[in-house]
Amino acid sequence: MSATPQKNRASRRVLAAAAGLATVGALVAAMPAGAHDRGHGHGHGHKPRTVDVQLLSFNDLHGNLEPPAGSAGNVSETQPDGTVKAIPAGGVEYLATSLRTARKGNPYSVTAAGGDMVGASPLLSGLFHDEPTIEALNGLDLDVTAVGNHEFDEGATELARLQNGGCHPVEGCYEKGKKFKGADFPYLAANVTKEKTGKPLLKPYTVWKKNGVKIGFIGVTLEGTPDIVTANGVKGLKFHDEVETINKYARELDRKGVKSIVALIHEGGAPASTSYNYDCDSPGAGDGISGPIVDIAKGITPKVDALVTGHTHQAYVCTVPDPSGKPRMVTSASSFGKLYTDTTLTYDRRTNDIVRTSVKSANHVVTRDQPKAPDMTRLIDRWNKLAAPIANKPQGWISADINGRGSTAPEKPLGNVIADAQLEGLAPADKGGAEVAFMNPGGIRADLVHKASGSEGDGVVTYGEAFTVQPFTNMMNVVDLTGAQLVTALQQQVSGPNEASPKILQVSKGLTYTLDLTKSGADRVVAGTIKLNGEAIDPARTYRVAMNEFLAGGGDGFPALGEGTNKLVGASDLDLFNAYLAAHSTATAPLAPPATDRITVIQ
């Protein structure tokens, strides 16, 4: 759930960031101010006054073209008897089939997304700077998406290329005689402006039209994007308040006669249940939804008729009252293409507005027992052939699943493996002399799954699978921090910006402490229990601490980690992870899931 770090690609995938900021597309879609089809009066008598518009939406695909492996590929479904069942879901071959089936019999259908379509992607897409995902989204007939924080992973110039097309500035074209065409849908970034000019980086909104029906879409990413993206990714950009921005452009659309408006917001919340079919509007104590999206929804003008959200990778269909007190639909479809939301917007031709009382919405599972879309299978096969020489190389062996993204515990087995790999790789004096390593939980993008993903055999970890876990290729840093700064950093996991939604760092072996969740704020980390190799942390002593460059820059709400001195830059996180797998596993002695006994949790 936590926000995720972004990448500074290792040298083989460095982006030429010097190209400056490209404006994508026209600033504002040209909108005729002509007459509206009001559905009454002479010549219009045959048209019904209202028409149902189908809005299909999803979010946080993160380049997962193939079905996500292990627990990261499941959605939870509450059964009639109250038990919860895990259903394998996702993969664009199935997402395409689901969307195409849903559109049948709906002459007015529009497909929109809530951001993070790309970034932190598995090797199949990430190796090619997410061109395969943009190509897949074109094939899915996506009409519009908001940008998410991950769209800025490689900077604004690369985002402009994903929109406009053209081959990669460093790596060129990937297929002979083929030039990357770019997205044939608009990326919207209403609350992102260029610092120098104050002008929007991309289109703030677009208007979908069919037979006189007009629906405006405004797209924003979370205002806190700079806190969760490396500095290079957001250089020269300013991120503005989501509510103020949406309200401003809703007024502009309204003035142009566009009365039906949907906001696409890359920010979200946490429902009381993780089951996709949970009734978010049930009245029980503790029911409903919490998190940043609630206050955002309550502040957005009633001119906006529905909110498609994302970022937290949760599934929900909730109503949150608008400023006038009327209920308004707020939806999110989990992540990785595992769900899609089907919302019915009843459009009144006389007012050109949505009849809010009749808006209906539900999430649907993208099941893997339906036919695959042949065009998506061909796309995956084509790119897999290009990726195969790198993707299929074995890196190590495991004896069972080692859960990372799929673990809901504060201390994750795969988090321990990654932190240990970073400590081991950077402990030698000439590599930095690290004594402890920290890994941010949002940077662990998948599980290590025992079952074979291809022809490599069960238990083999391929380069592609390791890349899917650590796709950012963040360079590692080793810095000096005092014991006092270390304690403060651990307290920042559960206080300040991380108080409402804690981000528990994964720690290398030797570091132990107690996390008391019955307390509030910084007190949840019991300071007197923090020990390194059995000894209490000395506030005055200097420690050598290893972490990725994103954390070392104070990312994810850890300013104390950004105070390090005497920085040494090491290998990439992925290189250290692969080296550790190679050193600690063989076919006959595979790596077992480690114990999770470093953080003692009191609930």
Image (cartoon, rainbow, N blue to C red):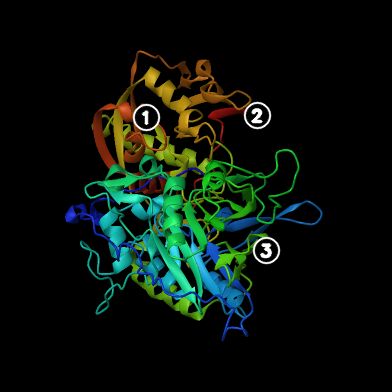
The percent coordinates of residue 42 (x first, y second) are 57, 84
**Which residue is label 2 attached to?**
603
Alpha-carbon neighbours of circle 2 within 10 Å: few (<14), some, or many (≥20)? few
Q: Are marks 1 and 2 in contact (CB under 8 Å)?
A: no
Q: Left or right of 563: which side holds 538?
A: right
Place residue 74 in its image quadrant.
Answer: bottom right
Q: Amino acid at mark 1?
A: Pro
Q: Amino acid at mark 2?
A: Gln
Taking the view exactly as shown, the residue that stands out farthest to the right is 81
Q: Left or right of 173: which side holds 56?
A: right
Relative vertical location of residue 568 with respect to residue 392 in this rendering, above or below: above
Placement of the C terminus among the 4 image quadrants: top right
In front of the other: 572 or 274: 274
**Disc 3 to disc 2, C-alpha distance:** 42 Å
> Which numbered disc, 3 or 1, marks the residue that appears first in the sequence?
3
The percent coordinates of residue 577 (x first, y second) are 39, 46
**Disc 3 to disc 1, C-alpha distance:** 47 Å
Label 3 vs label 1, nearer the camera: 3
In front of the other: 253 or 533: 253
Place residue 298 in its image quadrant.
Answer: top right
Q: Amino acid at mark 3?
A: Ser
The percent coordinates of residue 126 (x first, y second) are 37, 60
**Which residue is label 1 attached to?**
559
Relative vertical location of residue 95 with respect to residue 466 in this rendering, above or below: below
As helix, strand or loop, the secondary structure at mark 1 comes to helix
**Which residue is label 3 attached to?**
358
> Which numbered disc, 1 or 2, marks the residue that appears first in the sequence?
1
As helix, strand or loop, the secondary structure at mark 3 comes to helix
